[in-house]
Image: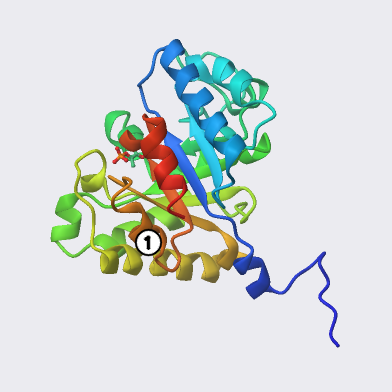
Amino acid sequence: MDMINTDDPPNDLRVLAMRPLIAGNWKMNTLRADASALAAGLVEQRAAIDPGCDILICPPFVSIRSVGEIVLGSPIKLGAQDCHVEVSGAHTGDVSAEMLVDAGCNFVIVGHSERRTNHGEGDKLVGEKAKAAFIQSLSAIICVGESLDERNEGKTLAVVEEQVSKSVPAEATAENTIVAYEPVWAIGTGLTPTIEQISEVHDNIRSLLNSRFKDGEEFRLLYGGSMNPGNAGEILAIKNVNGGLVGGASLKVEDFWSICTSV
Ligand code: PEP
């Protein structure tokens, strides 16, 4: 009988073993007390049940330490919503990847559409932020997604392809990188693409990663944009959707937990 070498399992077994990730992006919400209560509620739920997915929460910078103390020792992971490309220096208002690690983070979101739109961040900068994260052994969640005009003009796949090629650095691996497809028009709007539309983009991202990386099949691909307890099950069942990036619905324990248990 053939023995499976567990140190180096075949690709299909590694993909089967891929654990979905549900990530909460709290954005600029929660004062410290709310953040602590939200984190404590999730720790309590997770202590009772393993929903079969990894769970990540990304609070505002100022709550990272206090939330970190609450999730410490639990399987809930801690991340931030952005980082600067430099380690330190004259960058008023910015936070480096090294500082995030020092504060207890293992993940950082880069290239969220709100950073791209509100702060003029482009693909090159997003790629540099991801590299800055890798250097500090942080995993980067790299966000991509088309605007409504781009979708209506039939440019979705071209836009996402360009963003993935330019924002996902050559140094990316399935260990240090997660790609989140977040159509801009679906973020915070209550609108979601159809299952076919999500599937088409995720399959496309998978092909792009496979063409560039030998472990492309193992990168986790998250869907984000108005995911909620009502639509999560159907979205998370799509092939090549390996989890979700959740904004609004991550701010209530019951809603976020319900999404986690939909996996
Ligand atoms: C997000 O900001 O990453 C997001 C997906 O937001 P929402 O779930 O509120 O659409």
Location of residue 25 in the rendering, given as x and y in whole percent from the top left corner = 41, 34
Residue wearing tag 1: 161
Query: Image quadrant of ligand 1?
Result: top left
> Where is residue 122, by image quadrant?
top left
Say if residue 128 shows up in the picture.
yes
> Where is residue 202, by image quadrant?
bottom left
Location of residue 66 in the rendering, given as x and y in whole percent from the top left corner = 56, 15
Task: Kindly identify the residue that appears in the image at 41 percent across and 38 percent down.
Answer: 256
Q: In the picture shown, does residue 109 fall above or below 212?
A: above
Q: As drawn, is 40 to the left or to the right of 184?
A: right
Say if residue 111 shows up in the picture.
no
Q: As drawn, is 195 to the left or to the right of 239?
A: left
Task: Kindly identify the residue that appears in the image at 34 percent across and 61 percent down.
Answer: 234
Question: Residue most toward the front?
Answer: 48
Location of residue 182 in the rendering, given as x and y in whole percent from the top left corner = 33, 49
Q: As drawn, is 109 to the left or to the right of 1?
A: left
> Where is residue 49, by image quadrant?
top right
Observer-nearest of 204 and 257: 257
For label 1, the SS is helix
Q: Residue type at mark 1?
A: Glu
Location of residue 90 in the rendering, given as x and y in whole percent from the top left corner = 53, 13
Observer-nearest of 135 and 56: 56
